[in-house]
Structures are given as structure tokens and as C-alpha cells.
Amino acid sequence: DAGVTQSPTHLIKTRGQQVTLRCSPKSGHDTVSWYQQALGQGPQFIFQYYEEEERQRGNFPDRFSGHQFPNYSSELNVNALLLGDSALYLCASSLRTYNEQFFGPGTRLTVL
Amino acid sequence: AQSVAQPEDQVNVAEGNPLTVKCTYSVSGNPYLFWYVQYPNRGLQFLLKYITGDNLVKGSYGFEAEFNKSQTSFHLKKPSALVSDSALYFCAVRVADSGYSTLTFGKGTMLLVSP
């Protein structure tokens, strides 16, 4: 039973560029949440997708957007990258929006 | 709004000694509480959770945590620490019976177990 997978593992971008991160949920899960973990901080909730719609959003600017596909996989897009966007981005999946979340290994984004 | 406080940036303990990693929370309503562990360059691994029932929760790798409603605390404990327990530990909270499983995390506590 595959767990949550994320790609790529690492990514280096420069300021002003755009980036797309990908997440495949655990088998049987239909909800995907994204978190940002800056260095030395705990993960912070970005948004949650269910039935291909954004259901809940944290305190992140509109530069952060997402998408969920019919197979429940998800993408996180960040436009106009800033140095402060450098972080580990974690994807978590669950069955429905209210059940326990399972986390993927994360994507390390470095913005130069 | 909900929040989690982990008052210690780092906890040092000798192998074989008991360990405690502290966590207090603030939430409107009843809480669901979680502990996760993170090893270098890895994602979050689930340790244990409190949903309801017995205030003492037992989890993976010999860890346990005690829910204290009056003190709004959920401290992580282990009777005998191992060097391999050295890692970053996160406490998290969500509102019970809400429509969303979104978690609010503390900033983390680094546990260092010396041989």
C-alpha cells in the first residue's frame, strides 16, 4: 500500500520564478492538504483540496495556488518566488476532510 | 483560533533516563492532539494521538503522552530514552468534531539523547 508521495524531492529556483510541486495521496484517500515548513519552524497550513475544490485556506497570499485532479492527486503552485518561500513543503492526505492526515516526505524548495 | 506552544527549543537527556517533551495548547472547543517526529531531511512520522477516552495515550516506539484538560497540556514522555530517539518533535492540535482535519503545529522541540 503506497503512502503519500511527493515530487520532486529537491528543487532550486531563483527569485521571481514560478514552481509546481506534486503530491499523490495514500491509496484510498480523497483529500489533500499542503503545509509549508520554514527552517526552524513547525509546519503551517496552506490549503486543503477535496472534490477538486479548495475547501480551506491558511494565511498565505494568492501567489500560492493549487489544483486537485480527478485521481485525487494535487499540485501546489507558487508564483513570483521570494527568498522567504524557501522551505520544506509537506503534503498530507486523508479520507474526507475530517479524518486523520498522513504526511509525505516533502519537497525541499530553495529560492536563490 | 487555535495554537500550540512548545516551550523548549531543545531537550537534552542521557540514554536510559526518562524524557519529557512539553506541549500546551489553546483551542475553542474540545481538542484532538497529536505528536509527530521528524528526522533530518524527512517528512513527519505519526507517534500518537488523543481523541477521547483515557488521558494516557500510548504510541509508537515506547512513547506515551498524557492529556491534561485543566492544564491544557499534552506532554510527550518515554520511560527510558534511546540515542535513536534524537530527532525533532512536533505537537499539533485540531478542533474535535470539526469538518476539517487541518492541524496547527508547535514550532518543535529538538530532543538530543546522549550515549
Image (cartoon, grey):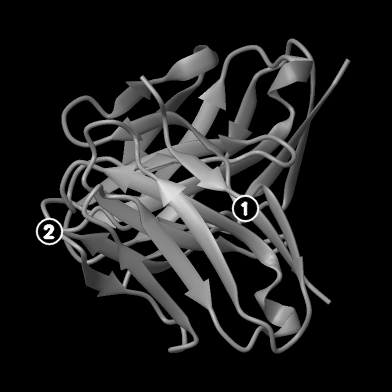
Badge 1: few (under 14), some or many (20 or more) residues near its Cα, within 10 Å? many
Residue B103 visible in rendering: no
Taking the image as shown, residue A62 lies to the left or right of residue A9, namely: left
Q: Crowding near pointer 2: few (<14 within 10 Å), some, many (20+)? A: few
Q: Is residue A104 above or below residue A108?
A: above
Task: State which quadrant residue B41 falls in.
Answer: top right
Task: Please name whichever residue, A97 or A76, is drawn nearer the observer in this view of the structure.
Answer: A76
Q: Residue at x 70, y 80 (%)?
A: A84
Q: Looking at the picture, how far across and down is residue A52, in whole percent?
A: 20, 64
Q: Is residue A28 left or right of residue A6?
A: left
Q: Nearer the viewer, residue B76 or A64?
A: A64
Disc 1 to disc 2, C-alpha distance: 27 Å
Of all chains, the one bearing label 1 is: A
Instruction: Tell me residue A35's x, y (percent).
Output: 48, 61
Q: Which residue is mark 1?
A: A107
Residue drawn 47% across and 17% down? B60
Name the residue tied to disc 2: B99
Tell me the chain of label 2.
Answer: B
Relative height, residue B48 to residue B16 (above, below): below
Left or right: B59, with A57 as reference point:
right
Q: Secondary structure at mark 1?
A: strand
Amino acid under disc 1: Thr
Q: Are marks 1 and 2 on the same chain?
A: no
Give the image location of residue A83, x and y in percent.
Answer: 75, 81
